[in-house]
Amino acid sequence: MKKVVGLILAVALVFAFSFATVQADEHMPEKPDTLNIIALDIDVDQFGEGVEIFEEKYGIEVEWMEFPYGDLWSQITTSIQGGQTIDLYMMSNSWHPELGALGMAMPLGDIVSQERLDEINERYFDITVEFLSSHGEQWALPGTASSVTFFYNATMLEELGYDSPPETWDEMLQISREAIDAGLADYGFFPGYLAGHEDGMVQFDIMLKLHGGEWMNEDMTEFTFNSEAGVEALTLMKEMLDEEIIPQASLEQSDWDNMHYFLAGNTPFEINWNFVHSMATNPDQSEIVDDFEVGHIPGIVRDTYTVLGGGGYAISPTTRSPEWAFELLDYMHREEGAVGVMTEQGGAEGTMVEVYENAADYGMTVEDYPMLEIFQEHLEYGGLRPSDNLSWYSEFRDNIFTPAMHRALLGQQDIEEALNEAQEEAQQMLDSQGM
């Protein structure tokens, strides 16, 4: 397996194997010498074992090009538009409607039979296949299924007289006020409301769904985020800012950058993606290794809710061999990959039913992997954003919804007026362009 950093492919070989290879099945085309992957920077650790099995079996070298999540979209689109040979790339579940519409991903049903695809999909939780499918096509095999988790500082809560986490949002806000007044915390928590960015969409999605609202009606013909639930959601977000339960910097920070207050012991709560768990348990990154716990996001109208994310590897239209790219994809997203993901994420984010149903057989217990149970519950009650359906989602997020949300949060425009204007503009696009 080769590991390539950046887009320059002419680099030194990191791994080299001498192995006997097997012949391909008769229906497969001639094997390429190499296959290239644009990867998330932690995925060599997560999916590397499955890739090595593929390499040893077929004698095809795999070259990894690793990037942090924030750089993936631009690297993928630039590479494909430039005609660079890319075989697989990491596809977030929020990207496939757009990338598929732009011709930057190959539908898996065009490469293998539906019968084989259905058989492979039986490995995975249904929602993980659903969130990589749009417009009648499946664009990737599930590799990760991320979720937003409620983290809390149990020691701080004990100092305030609480022996369990809050079950309702009102309880969470009251504990936040008490922690701030007692000088134990700077804020209750630190969300990311960044405009023109996915973080703001995630945080509003949580608030909208907790208030009982939805982005669209059931048949997806009308945007409904300006409903009473939407107004109440955005009103509460603004009230938390105005009361300074959350910092004004929330309007300028990403969820990927703001967890450090929590890790330093300066907030009682954190509502963020599962990756916070691995950071909170690392003494080099966290001051609360022995203090933090995980739970469910407190309820408002709904008892709880979480946002689901994640993704899988998709096949690039510039691949040298769609068939062999799919074969590699298949090996990446088997049990070895699921275990690799779960090991990195404290038991969360795997996509395979078998590994969760028989976690102990794979060396995983709740004591050592505390996210095992709560993550499976997330898959049952979690939901998706409009990104999983709209082929023009970036336009909706960057130029319609989050600017309106920010105007309202900054007090520049009435909340109901801002949401109504955003709904009207989004509805016009939906009526003219469809999903």
Image: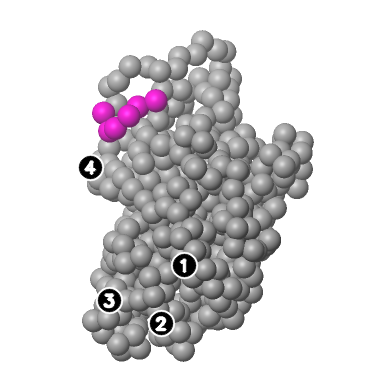
- 200 or 294, which lies in front? 294
Labels 3 and 1: the sequence-earlier one: 1
Labels 2 and 3: the sequence-earlier one: 2
The kind of residue on which mark 3 rests is Leu
- 36 or 155, which lies in front? 155
Q: Is residue 157 above or below residue 212?
A: above
Q: Is residue 251 left or right of residue 108?
A: left
Q: Which residue is mark 1?
A: 181
Q: Position of residue 7 (x, y in %)?
A: 27, 33
Labels 1 and 4: the sequence-earlier one: 4
Q: Which residue is mark 2?
A: 235
Residue depicted at x 53% and y 51%: 274
Residue depicted at x 38% and y 61%: 192
Q: Residues within 10 Å of mark 4 (few under 14, many from 20)?
A: few
Q: Secondary structure at mark 4?
A: loop
Q: Secondary structure at mark 1?
A: helix
Residue depicted at x 26% and y 84%: 413
Q: Which residue is mark 4?
A: 82
Callout 2 touching callout 4 (CB < 8 Å): no
